[in-house]
Amino acid sequence: MRAGGEARRAASRVGNSAALSTIARIGFAASGLMHFLIGYIAIRIALHHGGETDQSGAFAQLVKLPGGMIAVWIAAIGLAALGLWLLLQAGLGIGSSSKKRWARSLVSFGKAVAYLALAWTALSIALRKPANSASNTRQASGTLLSLPGGQALLIGVGVITAIIGAYFVYKGLRQKFRDDIRLPAGGAGKAVVVLAVTGYVAKGVAVIAVGFLFIVAAIKVKPNDASGLDGALKSLNDLPFGDALLFFVGAGFIAYGLYSFARARLAPL
C-alpha cells in the first residue's frame, strides 16, 4: 500500500511538472494546427482543388511550408507529451471510489491513445517515412474482416466510432467543453465558445461519417470502403449539396483548430 501511495505521489508530481505542462500545451497547439490544415484541405476539396483530408495529409502540407519540418518535429514532441500527460491523468484517477473519477480516467486514456497516434503520424512524416492513414485504415479493416466474427467486429467498431462522433456533437451543443478550458471574460470568451461549438459539431459529423463507412464496409465485406477520415469527408462531397456540407465541415475543423490554439493557452493543466 505504501509503495503504491509513493508511486501515485511521484506520478502526481510528474503530472504537475511545469515543463511537461508547457510541452503539453504545445501538443494542444499542434493538434490545433493539424485540424486547421485538415479544414483547409477539406475546403479545397469542396472547391474541387483536391488533397488528402486526414492527419498524414495535414502534416504533409505542413512540411511544404517554410520551416515546416521543424514544426512537424515540434508537433510530434508536443503531441507525445500531451499523450503522456493524459496517461498520467488517467492513471491518477484509478483507485478512486468515485464512479465519475473512473469515467474521467477512461476518457483521458482514450484521448491519450489518440494523441499518441497523432504523435506517431507526425514522427513518421518527420522521419520521411509517411504512413497513409486511409491505407492503414483499410488494412486494419481487412484484418478485422478476416477474423472469425470479423464482420460483427467491424460493425461494432463502426457503431462505437459513430457514438464517439455523436458525443462530439453533444459536447459542442451542450457546451461540455467548458470543463476543459478557463474561458476569458467578455467578447473573447464568447468567441472561444462559438469556435468550440462549431468545431465540435463539425468534427462530430466527420467522425460519424467515418463510423458509417466502417459499417458499410462490414456489410459489403469490402475493406476498401473503410477509408478513415479522408474517405469520410470525401464521401460527404458525394451527397446532395455535398460541396456546401464539406465546406461547412472544413470551416468547422478550422474553428476547432482555432479553439485548440486557445485551449493551449487556457487549459487548466
Image (tube, grey):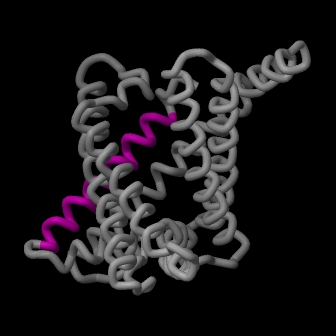
Note whether 205 is above or below 210 in the view shown.
above
Task: Name the one closer to the observer, 147 or 231.
Answer: 147
Q: Is residue 255 magenta?
A: yes
Q: Position of residue 23 (x, y in %)?
A: 67, 39
Q: Residue at x 27, y 32 (%)?
A: 193
Q: Position of residue 101 (x, y in %)?
A: 54, 22
Q: Residue at x 41, y 77 (%)?
A: 226
Quarter of the image with the N terminus in it: top right
Snapshot quadrant of residue 22: top right
Quarter of the image with the C terminus in it: top right
What secondary structure is the stretch in magenta mostly built from?
helix
Snapshot quadrant of residue 140: bottom right
Q: Residue at x 26, y 69 (%)?
A: 43
Q: Position of residue 13 (x, y in %)?
A: 77, 20
Q: Residue at x 61, y 77 (%)?
A: 131
Find the residue positioned furthest to the right.
Answer: 3
Note whether 178 is above or below 57 in the view shown.
above
Q: Is residue 100 magenta?
A: no
Snapshot quadrant of residue 146: bottom right
Q: Is residue 92 left or right of residue 104?
A: right
Task: Name the one closer to the observer, 54 or 112.
Answer: 112
What stretch of residues is rendered in magenta?
Answer: 242-264
Q: Position of residue 87 (x, y in %)?
A: 67, 38
